[in-house]
Image: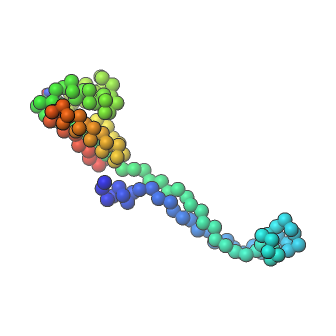
Amino acid sequence: MIISDLLALTDEAPVATRLEPVPDSMGPKEDDPGKGNGDGKGGTETGTITKTRPKTKRPSLYRVLLLNDDYTPMEFVVLVLQDVFNKSREEAMQIMLHVHQKGVGECGVYPYEVAETKVTRVMDTARKNQHPLQCVMEKQ
Ligand code: TYC
């Protein structure tokens, strides 16, 4: 977790509203049993109402990138792109060939934890299959 992401987490912002005293002419009458709080003072006391407004922040986005190497089989990369990044066979093939030719290519853009999970899945499956495939993320 990067410190800037911790600071960007969603928070609740308290909003305090000071109520003005209600003029007697507008307030409930002492002899009106349906008004006030029943303390016989007509309900004209002041108070503070605290509302909370959900203060949402858009999460920072991260690009997940695949790096080329000379040993990972093309078919393995295509299967990873389909499985981890939900790409169609055709899309996966295009991305794999792009990485193969240019050295690096984008698999997708996600919020921090989603990107981190995808990088981990790629690296774990590559290691299990003894391929040197590398996957990284970078802040957009
Ligand atoms: N260059 C690899 C090969 O020729 C294929 C490959 C493509 C490897 C993309 C990694 O991210 C990669 N077998």
| x then y, percent, for residue 23 | 78, 75
Position above or below: 54 against 125: below
Using the rendered view, name the quadrant where residue 39 is placed.
bottom right
Using the rendered view, name the quadrant where residue 70 is placed.
top left
| x then y, percent, for residue 132 | 14, 36
Any part of residue 30 in sight: yes
Q: Nearer the viewer, residue 93 or 119?
A: 119
Taking the image in four quarters, ligand 1 sits in the one at top left
Q: Residue at x 22, y 39 (%)?
A: 123
Using the rendered view, name the quadrant where residue 125 is placed.
top left
Instruction: Determine the residue located farthest toward the left in the rendered image.
Output: 70
Q: Is residue 99 left or right of residue 28?
A: left
Q: Residue at x 12, y 30 (%)?
A: 71
Instruction: Determine the residue located farthest toward the front in the rendered image.
Output: 128
Q: Nearer the viewer, residue 27 or 86?
A: 86
| x then y, percent, for residue 124 | 23, 38
Position above or below: 114 against 76: below
Q: Is residue 130 left or right of residue 5?
A: left
